[in-house]
Amino acid sequence: MLTAPDDDPVTRTTIGAAIEVHRVLGPGLLESVYEECLAEEMVRAGLAVRRQVLVPIKWRGKELATPLKLDVLVNDEVILEIKSVEEVLKVHKAQLTSYLRLAGKKRGLLLNFHVAYLKDGITRCVV
């Protein structure tokens, strides 16, 4: 499912932080810049933030050598996939859905900062 309830305080606070970062920086920067600024803004808002989180992947009972790497994990609950692309594709949404499933999380946000208004770059995901 690609929508999440609006009443979730973690995603609501995260979106507020992302809007503030986008308001100050605008579009057109690298994803890594948005990720770092967003992490700082979310910490200031009282959220627990981990960046570039490695998640082991198991295949037929064996842990693979290459783990999954999440852009951001908020409060150990919400996965953020940060993008700065002209257009969000179906594969980007599928990527977030797969990350949620493999990491055992229920909620995620796909945040595309390459838009005029960030509200147009937010995709909520619940599995």
Image: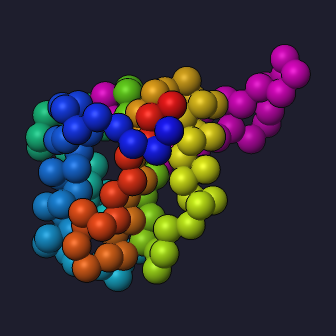
Specify the quadrant of the image occupied by residue 34.
Answer: bottom left
Q: Is residue 120 left or right of residue 71?
A: left
Percent position of residue 4, x then y: 35, 38
Q: Nearer the viewer, residue 90 or 110?
A: 90
Residue positioned 54% across, 53% down in the render: 93
Asked if 16 appears above or below 57 in the picture, the reply is below
- Tell me the colour scheme of the image: rainbow
Visible residue check, residue 21: yes
Percent position of residue 60, x then y: 88, 22
Q: Please give the range of residues in magenta.
A: 55-75
Residue positioned 46% across, 44% down in the render: 2
Residue positioned 42% across, 71% down in the render: 84
Percent position of residue 30, x then y: 41, 74
Asked if 92 appears above or below 60 in the picture, the reply is below
Visible residue check, residue 32: no
Q: Nearer the viewer, residue 10 or 6?
A: 6
Specify the quadrant of the image occupied by residue 37.
Answer: bottom left
Residue positioned 25% across, 79% down in the render: 116
Q: Is residue 8 left or right of residue 44?
A: right
Asked if 59 appears above or below 54 in the picture, the reply is above
Residue 69 is a magenta residue: yes
Q: Is residue 23 left or right of residue 97?
A: left
Percent position of residue 39, x then y: 27, 49
Residue 118 is a magenta residue: no
Residue farthest toward the top in the current orientation of the protein? 61
